[in-house]
Amino acid sequence: MQSAGDTLYLGIDGGGTRCRSRVVNSRNELLGTGIAGPANPFQNLQQARNSIVEAAKMAVTAAGLEPGCLAQLVAGVGIAGVNVPHAYQLMSAWQHPFGRMYLTTDTHIACLGAHGDRDGAVLVVGTGSVGYAIAGDSVLSLGGHGFPFGDTGSGAWLGFEAMRAALLAMDALGPATALVAALEHELGANRLGIIDAMAGARSRDYARLAPAVFGVADAGDPVAVAIVSRGRDYLDDLARRLLQTGVGRLSLLGGLSAQYASRLSLDVVASLHPAAGEPDAGAVRYAMLRHAQPAASERTPAAV
Amino acid sequence: MQSAGDTLYLGIDGGGTRCRSRVVNSRNELLGTGIAGPANPFQNLQQARNSIVEAAKMAVTAAGLEPGCLAQLVAGVGIAGVNVPHAYQLMSAWQHPFGRMYLTTDTHIACLGAHGDRDGAVLVVGTGSVGYAIAGDSVLSLGGHGFPFGDTGSGAWLGFEAMRAALLAMDALGPATALVAALEHELGANRLGIIDAMAGARSRDYARLAPAVFGVADAGDPVAVAIVSRGRDYLDDLARRLLQTGVGRLSLLGGLSAQYASRLSLDVVASLHPAAGEPDAGAVRYAMLRHAQPAASERTPAAV
């Protein structure tokens, strides 16, 4: 065990597309960063573990440290899905190479990164959608239940609802919509060929259709407008419930934040604050918070 | 080539759970039947082919014929998914053991079986949902686009919408509903554990929740009632579009036919007729119709 002054902290921000890392000293001075491939334990557990180690090694190397020092690092790891008990257990059971590993959700570290020591909330809308608030000693997590049944308003949800609407329109069992032509164009397919193109599709495949859905809505197509409005209404409700915890600050994050920033209700928009820092900095902050509680045992991150 | 009087016909009804077969002579007299495992080319192409051959061999054996006579059979094969071009191509490319094979959808043979030589329509509601009408020389196929984006009103759709509603209710971002307790009970899980239980679930897994959804609706839960009503409204619309083709007969088939028969609108219910025969008999009928058109080339079954 090193003395407190020498403790090095690793922050890991694991996502479905890439994994970011940073190493800092005990005064939170940045020593090095790294970036590696996907780290989503639901999609590929071994790949997620490999990406975390790879990103950590890159940050350590960038910091001018020996690879062997991984065993001294106090790691804060934020990763999607670990609010679900089974995924948390799979990640916790890992014989990881770090000195200590404190595990929490990607949303939690995004919130810690966005607001630092202050109370605050995040609404993350990209491929998925999720809300998280830290208010004093309590946290509130909403949404983030994953595709296909959760994540209302997200990119994946928008693409999925557009597919549903287009297929109903093709049968004349739903209103005609320009979404049919838009999806045919996006998928390079005609009519029922869009089913073929999306057979077995994952959340990211549906999310790739989201820009087209926004485009058709912006052109005034009533069906697309209705889909986007349903997503917007859900996110408005979610944001208001986060703000009801008493936090004054809400950051809108994720790949669709710009698209929704212009659509959310004025009362919600009035509470929006830019994020102060990145999720990997929030992961470092989480490691420091947990490491300062020596008696704390590993546990599933509280959902509510 | 045998003389016309000696031609034997094989009817195959391939489904996601089992594959049924029958062999008849040229006067459509039943010689033997068989039954084998799943035959869904989307789920498992090789298994589907194996099940078809196994069911065919059983029917041939039951008819007291030599296994080698498969090469003389004129087969009508009705199987899910071949309205989608890619699945049709995969099944058509098969070096099957039959003398001739005429391929069409499971819904088409269900319609031929239900109505024989008469015009008629079928509305099939089980794990999936689909409508099909034969009116003179034209056919109309509606729905049947598959899970998760199609098959409104089906068992899989009911289970899926119940999951969505339960998760919204848990977050208090949707109305409270007894579906939460019902799904927890069905899945042997608590709260977010239902996500775990349904992670990666297929259409049949969602369809297993359908009886619980009907049960909660029958007990008066407004959220469950709204879901079932949306499914019922879609199926009413679908049935009316089928009847608009001019067919006077509509048969309601599939595992949820009893549940919906009591819920459909009176104008639709007034057009319901029991099916005259089984889908495998419709597959035989299809083989006979196609074989009587010697110039007809293999083609994708017309969708509309």
Image: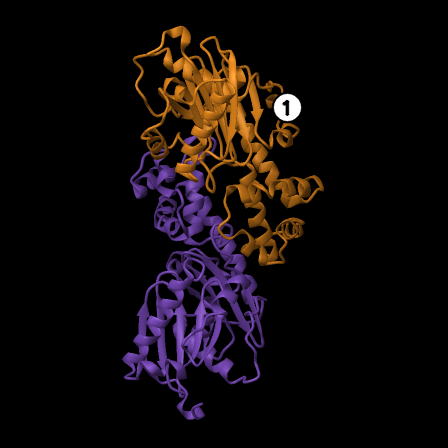
Chain colours: A purple, B orange
User: Where the C terminus of chain A falls, by quadrant?
Assistant: bottom right
Residue A107 vertical position relative to residue B144 in the rendered view, above or below? below
Residue B265 vertical position relative to residue A231 in the rendered view, above or below? above
- Residue B240 pos. (x, y %): 53, 23
Question: Could you say which is closer to the camera, residue B181 or residue A3?
Answer: A3
The residue type indicated by label 1 comes to Leu
Q: Is residue A248 left or right of residue B89?
A: right
Residue visible at 49% across and 25% down in the picture: B58
Do we see residue B96 in this rendering?
yes
Residue visible at 40% across and 73% down in the picture: A12
- Label 1 chain ID: B
Q: Is residue B96 left or right of residue A303?
A: left
Q: Quadrant of residue B214?
A: top right
Residue A212 vertical position relative to residue A301 in the rendered view, above or below? above
User: Where the N terminus of chain A falls, by quadrant?
Assistant: bottom left
- Residue A302 pos. (x, y %): 57, 69
Q: Quadrant of residue A275?
A: bottom left
Question: Could you say which is closer to the camera, residue A9 or residue A176?
Answer: A9
Give the residue number, with chain letter if any, for mark 1: B266
- Residue A161 pos. (x, y %): 45, 44
Question: Could you say which is closer to the camera, residue A228 or residue B149?
Answer: B149
Question: Could you say which is closer to the camera, residue B159 or residue A151?
Answer: B159
Q: Secondary structure at mark 1?
A: helix
Residue visible at 57% across and 49% down in the picture: B163
Label 1 neighbour load within 10 Å: few <14, some 14-19, many 20+? few
Do we see residue B133 in this rendering?
no
